Each structure stands twice: as C-alpha cells, then as structure tokens.
Image (cartoon, rainbow, N blue to C red):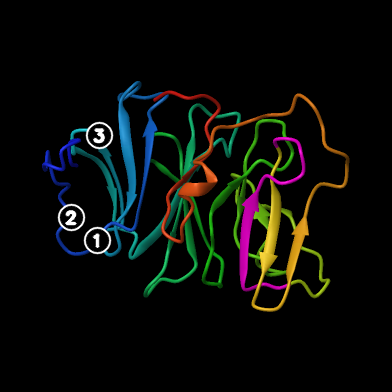
C-alpha cells in the first residue's frame, strides 16, 4: 500500500509469487462485520483476504490463483460471495466462497480463460458468473455452480468474451469476438425500466488483469 505521495505504508506477506488481481470489499456479516478488506489472488500463494492495514485475515492455498470477483451471486445469503479460478498447473478449477471467505464448493471447468465476470442478466438483483464463450462448458453459472445461461451453437467466436451494458437498460449484454467477427447477445425481451442497477468498476478501468465487483450500494 502506498500513500498519496507514493510512499510505502505496508506490504502484504506474499513471498513466493505476485498478486494478479485485487478487489476491495467490506464484510457484511460475521466476526469482521463492517471491516473493509482486499480480496486477492496471488499465484502460488493462493487466495488471500487482508484488511486495509495489510493484516492477513484469510488464506486458502488452492494453487496458482489467477482471477477473482465479488458479487451478489447468492441473494439469500448475506453480503457478497467470492469466486476464484486457478491457472498455471491447476487450470480451470473454480472455487466459490461465502462473503466471509469460507469455501462453499469447487468445480473443474476443463477450459482455460474463465472470466468470472459478474453479469447483471435478469435485472432482479442476482448476478450470474460469466465463464467463457464455449457452447458446452461456457455461458453463465449461478452461485450454486449450475449453468443458467448457455450460448447457442450458432458459430459465434469463442476466443474472447465480455459483459458490457449496451442496450439501454442496466442489464448487461455479452460480447464474443475473435480476429474475424463479433457477436452480441442480449435478453429476449425489450429494455426494461426500474431494473437492478449494481455498482461496477467503470469501463475505462477494464484490463486483462482486473478484479471485478458488482455491489448493490457504494460503501466506499
């Protein structure tokens, strides 16, 4: 952590590898309720949660942790759930945690490049998890690991995928593309008014290495 002058304030205890993605969050339940935290994926160090002073609160040595997102994946549970995926040496294993960092389930997707992007697809307050653009092993899953939105077998490109709000309401569209073509998918109804509008990072902050979030309210 650096202050506004670029001076080091503290260093997280990551010795073997580097941190790929960081998401700020706040505990909404449990013994740390109200505490702000960083959820981090740190390569061979695994999945880490620290407070804003660098104190390590949770660590799960799941292998080479690569991507992380926080969102309202299970609306019947408090707070925001956390999903993480592995890469080097453990490709395609997805881990799902409750809002306090306790693991609920894991699954092997068999494909690399799982995005774990929170998707506001239905507009009812529940986020889905975008994996990739593959017809069989891609699409979106819910917080129980069940595939709830499947891509059609229509010849769409599968190299890249992204969730972007394009069509006029606050729900997300899915864009898939490669070097030759681009497909855009949206819901099969017209744009709606008064649908769920979560807070996400702005589009200009998007990059290949980004921790993602979808929050009901601004707590920062």
Label 2 sits on a secondary structure element that is loop
Q: Which residue is mark 3?
A: 51
Residue 135, given in percent of the width and then of the height, sits at: 73, 69
The answer to the question of whether label 3 and label 1 lie on touching residues, with beta carbons closer than 8 A, is no
The answer to the question of whether label 2 and label 1 lie on touching residues, with beta carbons closer than 8 A, is yes
Measured Cα–Cα span from mark 2 to mark 1: 7 Å
Q: Is residue 82 above or below residue 210?
A: above
Label 3 sits on a secondary structure element that is strand
Is 107 situated left or right of 186 in this image? left
Residue 186, given in percent of the width and then of the height, sits at: 79, 50
Q: Which residues are magenta?
A: 157-170
Quarter occupied by the C terminus: top left
Image quadrant where residue 44 sits: bottom left
Question: What label does residue 14 carry, if any?
Answer: 2
158 magenta-colored: yes
Using the image as rendered, state which of residue 58 and residue 129 is in the foreground: 129
Residue reaching furthest front?
A: 5
Residue 19, given in percent of the width and then of the height, sits at: 28, 57
Using the image as rendered, state which of residue 61 and residue 156 is in the foreground: 156
Count residues near mark 2 (Cα–Cα under 10 Å), then give few for <14, some for 14-19, many for 20+: some
Residue 125, given in percent of the width and then of the height, sits at: 66, 31
Count residues near mark 1 (Cα–Cα under 10 Å), then give few for <14, some for 14-19, many for 20+: few
Q: Which residue is mark 1?
A: 18
Residue at (30, 63) in percent of width and height = 43
């Amino acid at each position: 952590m650096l202050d506004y002058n670029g001076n080091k304030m503290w260093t997280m205890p990551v010795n073997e590898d580097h941190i790929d993605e960081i998401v700020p969050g706040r505990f909404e339940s449990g013994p740390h309720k109200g505490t702000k935290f960083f959820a981090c994926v740190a390569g061979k160090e695994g999945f880490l949660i620290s407070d804003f002073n660098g104190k390590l609160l949770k660590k799960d040595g799941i292998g080479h942790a690569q991507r992380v997102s926080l969102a309202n994946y299970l609306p019947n549970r408090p707070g925001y759930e956390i999903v993480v995926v592995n890469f080097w040496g453990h490709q395609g294993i997805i881990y799902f945690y409750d809002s306090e960092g306790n693991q609920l389930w894991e699954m092997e997707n068999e494909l690399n490049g799982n995005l774990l992007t929170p998707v506001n697809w239905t507009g009812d307050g529940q986020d889905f998890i975008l994996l990739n653009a593959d017809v069989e092993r891609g699409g979106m899953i819910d917080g129980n690991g069940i595939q709830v939105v499947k891509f059609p077998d229509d010849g769409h490109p599968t190299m890249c995928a992204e969730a972007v709000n394009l069509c006029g309401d606050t729900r997300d569209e899915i864009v898939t593309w490669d070097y030759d073509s681009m497909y855009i998918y949206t819901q099969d109804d017209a744009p709606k008014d008064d649908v769920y509008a979560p807070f996400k990072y702005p589009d200009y902050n998007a990059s290949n290495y980004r921790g993602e979030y979808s929050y009901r309210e601004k707590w920062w």
